[in-house]
Image (spheres, rainbow, N blue to C red):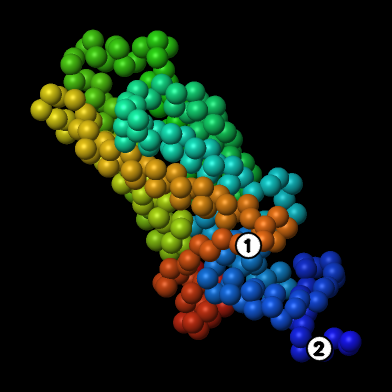
Amino acid sequence: MATQPEDFNKETNGTGGMNREMTHEEHQTAKAAARFGYGPLAHVNTSSGESRLPAFGGEFQPGLYKQVKDRNIANPAPLGLSAFALTTFVLGLINMGTRGLSAPNLVVGIAFGYGGLVQLLAGMWEMAVGNTFGATALSSYGGFWLSFAIILTPGGFDIESALQASGPNAFYDEFGFFLMGWFIFTTILVLCTLRSTVAFFSLFFSLDMAFMLLGISYLHRDAMDMPNLPVMKAGGFFALLAAFLAWYNALAGIADDSNSFFVIPVAHFPWSVKVLTEKGKLNKDDRANV
């Protein structure tokens, strides 16, 4: 039975001239993917000549960015997001007092090896692909986990015991200042995600709340001058939320039509450049100047 021309749509893959026929069902799926803002391959029209791609957390890009053609390294964002997610997940559970746990000794090892070293390397690789936001965020949070591990290494650097010897509240106060500094830094990054995607913004917003609440728990202590447990548990909850959102954005960056039967929705904001362009409120010249 002969194939009807209207049942297919032409798709061109890159500039190499390789064409294949896209079925009507695939065409409709691609249209839906473009409308909701899915993963890396689903939202790239390689035949349109589009030089700037919309914001995408799977690439750790909060705004329009140029596709990196013929790069010699893979996308480092999912690796950095995964390293951040696992370390934050474990610490979030401990902060929430899960199964009666309170000492973050196990997190020290993860913070050195995965959340620290691996995430720092991912940040350096983001520099190699020209992503300033990704390099700043991943490298900084890699540094956070390394410094966190150095401070809390049991019997290692003696930072906690030295501060406790200098005064009963010295460690809690200084550790609270440390966390509040990271709250300020994360707020700066949150401001840079306001025009990105719901998934990417939600990651940084939940992390921002976690830093703020955990910092408050050390600075605004209870009647026994111990960290405020309810506030710490609230911070642990937001840390868990940030961990799952980081994994979600990492999956969006990994899953594509070469390895998955589905792509991950990331939901662009109504005021994002992508949505405004689709609604005709921004033309290509305006978009190029954004």
Q: Residue at x 53, y 38 (%)?
A: 83
- In the rendered image of this protein, does residue 31 appear above or below residue 129? below
Query: Residue 108: x percent and y percent?
Result: 45, 24
Query: Residue 12: x percent and y percent?
Result: 78, 73
| Residue type at the position of mark 2 | Pro
Q: Nearer the viewer, residue 133 or 210?
A: 210
Instruction: Looking at the image, tell me whether mark 1 or mark 2 is earlier in sequence order.
Output: 2
- Which residue ends up furthest to the right in the rendered image? 1
- In the rendered image of this protein, does residue 182 appear above or below residue 53? above
Q: Quadrant of the N terminus?
A: bottom right
- Which residue ends up furthest to the left in the rendered image? 223
Query: Residue 273: x percent and y percent?
Result: 48, 71
Q: Residue at x 64, y 74 (%)?
A: 29
- In the rendered image of this protein, does residue 280 appear above or below residue 14? below
Q: Is residue 10 left or right of residue 280?
A: right
Q: Residue at x 60, y 50 (%)?
A: 130
Q: According to the image, label 1 marks what residue?
A: 262
| Mark 1 and mark 2: Cα distance apart in space | 27 Å
Q: Residues within 10 Å of mark 2 (few under 14, many from 20)?
A: few
Q: Is residue 40 left or right of residue 144?
A: right
Query: Residue 156: x percent and y percent?
Result: 42, 12
Q: Residue at x 31, y 32 (%)?
A: 97
Picture quadrant where residue 212 is located: top left
Q: Is residue 183 visible?
A: no
Tag 1, which secondary structure? Answer: loop
Tag 2, which secondary structure? Answer: helix
Q: Is residue 73 visible?
A: yes
| Residue type at the position of mark 1 | Phe
Q: Is residue 283 left or right of residue 16?
A: left
Q: Nearer the viewer, residue 64 or 119?
A: 119
